[in-house]
Image (cartoon, grey):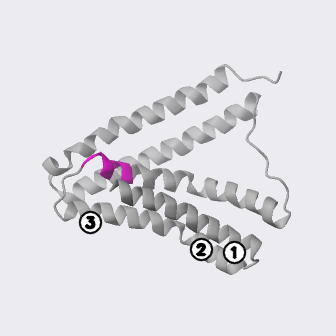
Amino acid sequence: MVSLIVAGEAGFWVVLAAGLLARYALRLRRTGLALLALLPVVDLVILGATVADLRGGATADWTHGLAAAYVGFSVAYGHRLVRWADGHAAHRLAGGPKPPGMPKYGAARARYEWGVFLLTLLASVVTVALVAAVQWLVGDAARTAALDSWYPRMALVVGINLVVAASYTVFPKRAK
């Protein structure tokens, strides 16, 4: 499963790079758009392989939960990441304006961090829902018991992100 997840992550970046190169360097806008539209297929392949592996009789381990987390974070952060990469590709390959960076100080940075918190919360909710769905689909609590560790793990991730976002609100970073 780890190899599949690593291959999926590599495939995500290859498809993203190919889509942006086609779109900006080769000026094939439709081809680039079609390639970028394939990005969710990577998630579906990883999720499908995970379910197939477990339905085929495998006993769940941490890697099956990692596959769910990969898909969850891809769903939550994928659009933002593609938009970021698209802005940089447009700037470097097509003479577009330089994309703005993230805010560094004050209330703007706090709002940014709360946005990251909300994306992390969404990613965690999707991950937990996928883990629960896989457990339900397999229907054998003994074989999927290892996936239970992903519930508190996702709560910890959300909690850490909450502390970070709150710290930028309570103790805003100021320009020197």
Residue 34 place in picture, x, y as percent? 61, 77
Residue 157 inside the magenta-drawn segment: no
* Chain-order first, disc 2 or disc 3: 2
Q: Label 3 amino acid? A: Ala
Question: Which span is picked out in magenta?
Answer: 61-67
Residue 64 place in picture, x, y as percent? 31, 52
Q: Label 2 amino acid? A: Leu
Q: CA distance from mark 2 to mark 1?
A: 8 Å
Q: CA distance from mark 1 to mark 3?
A: 34 Å
Please name the residue that numbered disc 2 is placed on.
35
Q: Quadrant of residue 82?
A: bottom right
Task: Depth check: give the residue in front, 163 or 67.
Answer: 67
Q: Label 1 amino acid? A: Ala
In front: label 1 or label 3: 1
Identified at 47% across, 30% down, the residue is 159
| Dominant secondary-structure state across the stretch colored magenta | helix
In front: label 2 or label 1: 1
Mark 1 secondary-structure assignment:
helix
Mark 2 secondary-structure assignment:
helix
Residue 66 inside the magenta-drawn segment: yes
Q: Which mark is residue 52?
A: 3
Task: Depth check: give the residue in front, 125 or 45.
Answer: 45
Identified at 60% across, 57% down, the residue is 79
Residue 85 horizontal side relative to residue 145, left or right: right
Residue 117 place in picture, x, y as percent? 56, 38
Task: Depth check: give the residue in front, 142 or 95.
Answer: 95
Q: In the rendered view of the protein, which quadrant contains the C terminus?
A: top right
Asked if the residue at tag 1 contacts the one at tag 2, i.e. Cβ–Cβ closer than 8 Å, the answer is yes
Please name the residue that numbered disc 1 is placed on.
22
Q: Quadrant of residue 50?
A: bottom left
* Chain-order first, disc 1 or disc 3: 1
User: How many residues crowd around disc 1 within 10 Å: few (fewer than 14), some, or many (20 or more)?
Assistant: many
